[in-house]
Image (cartoon, rainbow, N blue to C red):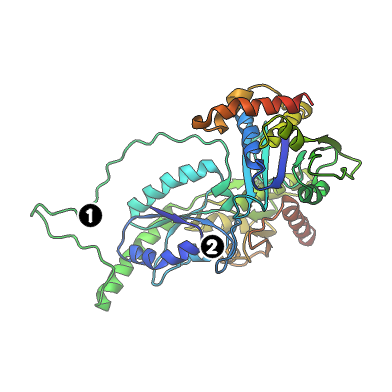
Amino acid sequence: MTTQILIAGFGGQGVLFAGKFIAYKGLIENKEVSWLPSYGPEMRGGTANCSIIISDEPVGSPIVSNPDVLIAMNLPSLDKYEKEAKPGSLIFVDSTLIERKVERGDVKAFYIPATKMAMDAGIPTLANMIIVGKVLKETEGLSKDNLEEAMKKVVSAKRIELLDMNIKAIEAGYNY
Amino acid sequence: MTSSSSPGISLKQEGISYIAGADLPALIVNVQRGGPGLGGIQPSQSDYFQATKGGGHGDYHLIVLAPASVQEMADLTIKAFDLSEKYRVPTMLLADGTMGQMMEPVELPEIAPKESEKPWAVRGTKMEREHNIINSLYLKPEILEKTNFERFERYKAIEENEAMYEEYMMDDAEICVVAFGIAARVSKNAVTAARKKGIKVGLIRPITLWPFPKEALKKAADKVKGFISVELSMGQMIEDIKLSTECKKPVELCNRTGGMIPTPEEVLASIEKLAKEAK
């Protein structure tokens, strides 16, 4: 089985971080994985997206153009990638930032008010991981296993206090 | 060792030519981005000519290695140092923006430290031998010609011994896709998809761009109906394919440029078009 995931949003929303977490989780679970970022020269603002592939086979092209799982963190991303998603794919939308619904009828859409949930929970920067929590719940082949181990790979040891907050965010999205 | 991405490599060309002229080992890593000029910051393969045909001034070559995975980024870096030392020729690792930015599993090989003889090194004579002089200035044309002839003897040995490539599904192939680096990864997906549609297509992935795997291409030219060069440029490697195959078979170009990357679907469409024409 091969799962092609595309996460897209503004720079600064944690698009690349969320992708790294998913890739490392796959690696820990002995899958073949790749993670490829694409972004402009800006640190914040601009658009950022990243391709993650989790597979039982060696990964060919690391570029995801037709995702099985699309995470849209802002409207331009949904506008751009909704039409590229595979029929039958899962589309996860941050419904705080995106007012419109997914237009296609051949995909399964999930609306998570992730940015609002993150603000309310006092973890305003972790809307990305709230959506990841929902993705782990709804996507075949992904699970809630190995959260902490994978998180340790992506959270700097110097800022280990972020580990619990990230896991809390994932749990919140998982249970939404 | 030094590294940069495209515009920075252009700035280094004078020094690279001097290194080649002084017969020094060096590794230069170019993680290519779109050009010319300041260009963009997305992946590209448009420095192919610069890397394989000289780049700086004068009669010289670099050994050019083209990794197609993070694993090869590691393995070919080691290989590049070894080749460079062995032949006293500067070597270039020609990667692109995807190779530079992507993550995938990698096993770093254990490297045993190697003692290598460097009788040419400038490190003191202990009054036991003549001075070594490292220089690229030869004002007597007879001497400069001789050093160039000698260097090209080494290039000949490199061409005979060091060409590397990977073949994928070439056994019964009637169409041969040629691609390196990220373009080869994309092409592999397209070849697999075309095979599912019953098209007999294979892939030759040059791992060394100089020396170019001429023999493999030449051999393929005798059995396939045509070639497709897949590149992130306006078509540069295609010239080496035509030279290697002596234009015996048509060579099509499937390309994107300026930081764009062809999709597997685009490569597949190219394969299907050639398959139809070749019938």
Q: Could you tell me if residue B68 is visible in this image? A: no
Q: Secondary structure at mark 2?
A: helix
**Residue at the spot x=72%, y=34% of the render?**
A119
- Residue B58 lies, with reference to residue A112, above or below; the image says below
> Image quadrant of residue A66?
top right
Residue B169: percent from left, percent from top: 65, 45
Q: Which of the pair B158/A125 is nearer the observer?
A: A125
The number of discs equals: 2
Label 2 resides on the chain identified as: B
Per the image, the residue denoted by label 2 is B48
**Residue at the spot x=70%, y=23% of the render?**
A144
Per the image, the residue denoted by label 1 is B121
Residue A24: percent from left, percent from top: 60, 32
Q: Secondary structure at mark 1?
A: loop
Residue B37: percent from left, percent from top: 55, 69
Query: Looking at the image, is mark 1 or mark 2 earlier in the sequence?
Result: 2
Tell me the kind of residue under disc 1: Ala
At label 1, counting other C-alpha atoms closer than 10 Å, the crowd grade (few under 14, some 14-19, many 20 or more) is few
Real-space CA distance between mark 1 and mark 2, rounded to the nearest whole angstrom: 31 Å
Q: Which of the pair B4/A98 is nearer the observer?
A: A98
Q: Which of the pair B42/B230 is nearer the observer?
A: B42
- Residue B11 lies, with reference to residue A13, above or below; the image says below
Q: Give the number of the disc on residue B42.
A: none
Quick one: which residue is furthest to the top in this view?
A145
**Residue at the spot x=91%, y=41% of the render?**
A105
| Callouts 1 and 2 close, C-beta under 8 Å | no
Tell me the kind of residue under disc 2: Tyr
